[in-house]
Image (cartoon, grey):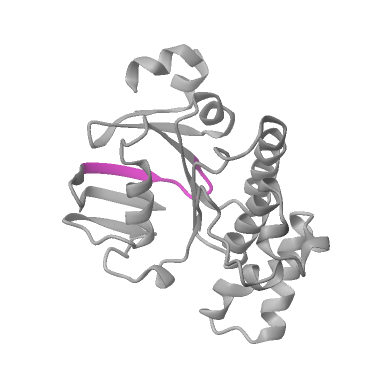
Amino acid sequence: MLTISDLAVTVGDFELHDVNLAVDPGEYFVILGASGAGKTVLLETIAGRYGLKRGKIEMDGRDVSALPPERRNIGFVYQNYELFPHMTVEQNIMFGLGYRGLPRPARQEKAAEMMDVLSISSLRNNYPDTLSGGEKQRIALARSLAVSPELLLLDEPMSALDYMTKQRVKDMIRQVHKKFSPMVLHVTHDIEEALFFADRIGIIKEHTMATVFGPEDIANMEKGDFYAYL
């Protein structure tokens, strides 16, 4: 379980404050908000990029607020994928496993498993600049899942994809979540995307988590109803 209590963080001139959130094991939680609302700042703070001004971040009751990113057991898929251009697909996927101290054969075995699950085994020796947007998204997801994260953070994961690729990636992410069941925090400004994935939806507005909608709320609301909260 992820528990965020009274979180406040300042990044330059921007501040998030009084953010409270609990995400259950296996839950798919989507955060909606306008551009500049602080969605990515929240994800990066949970991942360990920014120190807290106040508050606490806990994973299964363990305070991780002061831990470095590599000790939080969190996977992160960025909007622009953040693949290493000088590494092959296999090397990109293996990268995070190196911090876990796994010997090379074990890293290769895990990478092969992820490539098989995401149907990218044929791309093993390719470099990122030869890949399509959808392929890059699969590599980034494979790299994040390879470390068996307790929590998977998705930052606008489909914003750079064309319509047809986006539909395929949506189905892929849903299948991956069903197979591996990590907690997911997925940020987007796309209401349709949020409704497709979410068990619950949180709204970031005025620098805080302003509203959270549960399953019954979501089932009884139309797409247009959410605009009033953004």
**Corner quadrant of residue 46:** bottom left
Tell me the residue at 33%/51% (across/down). Answer: 3
Residue found at the very far front of the displayed protein: 129
Q: Is residue 221 visible in this depiction of the protein?
A: no
User: Residue 221 in the image: x percent, y percent?
Assistant: 47, 14
187 left or right of 140? left
User: Residue 192 in the image: x percent, y percent?
Assistant: 55, 24
- Frontmost residue, 130 versus 125: 130
Dominant secondary-structure state across the stretch colored magenta: strand
Tell me the residue at 16%/56% (across/down). Answer: 53
**Corner quadrant of residue 50:** bottom left
Tell me the residue at 24%/37% (across/down). Answer: 208
Residue found at the very far right of the displayed protein: 122
226 left or right of 122? left
Asked if the stretch drawn in magenta spans residue 127, the answer is no
Asked if the stretch drawn in magenta spans residue 23, the answer is yes
Figure check: 201 above or below 178: above
**Corner quadrant of residue 128:** bottom right
Highlighted magenta segment, given as a residue range: 18-28
Figure check: 192 above or below 141: above
- Frontmost residue, 193 versus 139: 139
Tell me the residue at 23%/37% (across/down). Answer: 207
Q: Is residue 133 visible in this depiction of the protein?
A: yes
User: Residue 137 in the image: x percent, y percent?
Assistant: 63, 50
User: Residue 195 in the image: x percent, y percent?
Assistant: 54, 26
130 left or right of 75? right
